[in-house]
Amino acid sequence: MHRFRLSAVCFLVLATLALAACSSAKPEATVQAFYEAAAKGDVEKATAQVSFADVPANGMVQAKGKVQMIVGEMQSRIDANDGLDKIEVIESSIDDEGETARVQVRVVFDNGKDLTETHHMVRDDGKWKIRLR
């Protein structure tokens, strides 16, 4: 019985830590998830990394279509460069209020070529999302 309680307590502690880590994700993790989803052509997961908070209801279909197009272009670029090797964070900054951020990354392809991009981020329902421009 004692071992069961100890196991249960350990499980609860680990679960709590895992949930805390997910809720305080950094903006860099969102950018990383976006590129990984784009590399796989996973439009749904990539779209989940984008904030649509500033998009009016009547523009939602067009905005999601724009993201789908961006993901398709990124996947084509990644495929043309033999795949995605890594995403390196060059610079990341969060504003004083903790509501917006800027993340500059270097996307390295498997063929050795790279691409530098800057993403503007916003907190959307407590999660970091890429601001759609």
Image: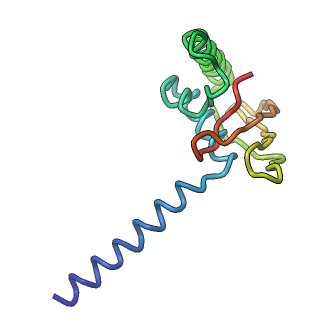
Residue 12: x percent and y percent? 35, 72
Residue 126: x percent and y percent? 59, 47
Q: In what quadrant of the picture does the N terminus appear? A: bottom left
Q: How is this picture coloured?
A: rainbow
Q: Is 79 positioned to the left or the right of 41 in the image? A: right
Residue 38 against residue 9 in the figure, above or below? above
Residue drawn at point x = 50 percent, y = 31 percent: 45
Q: Is 7 positioned to the left or the right of 58 in the image? A: left
Residue 89 against residue 78 in the figure, above or below? below
In this rendered view, identify the residue nearer to me: 42 or 131.
131
Residue drawn at point x = 28 percent, y = 76 percent: 8
Q: In what quadrant of the picture does the C terminus appear? A: top right
Could you tell me how many numbered marks the image carries? 0
Q: Residue furthest front?
A: 57
Q: Residue furthest bottom?
A: 2
Residue drawn at point x = 40 percent, y = 65 percent: 15
Quarter of the image holding residue 49?
top right
In this rendered view, identify the residue nearer to me: 112 or 108.
108
Residue 74: x percent and y percent? 65, 21
Residue drawn at point x = 73 percent, y = 38 percent: 121
Residue 76 against residue 21 in the figure, above or below? above
Quarter of the image holding residue 30?
top right
In this rendered view, identify the residue nearer to me: 100 or 2.
100
Residue 61: x percent and y percent? 54, 11
Residue 3 against residue 26 in the figure, above or below? below
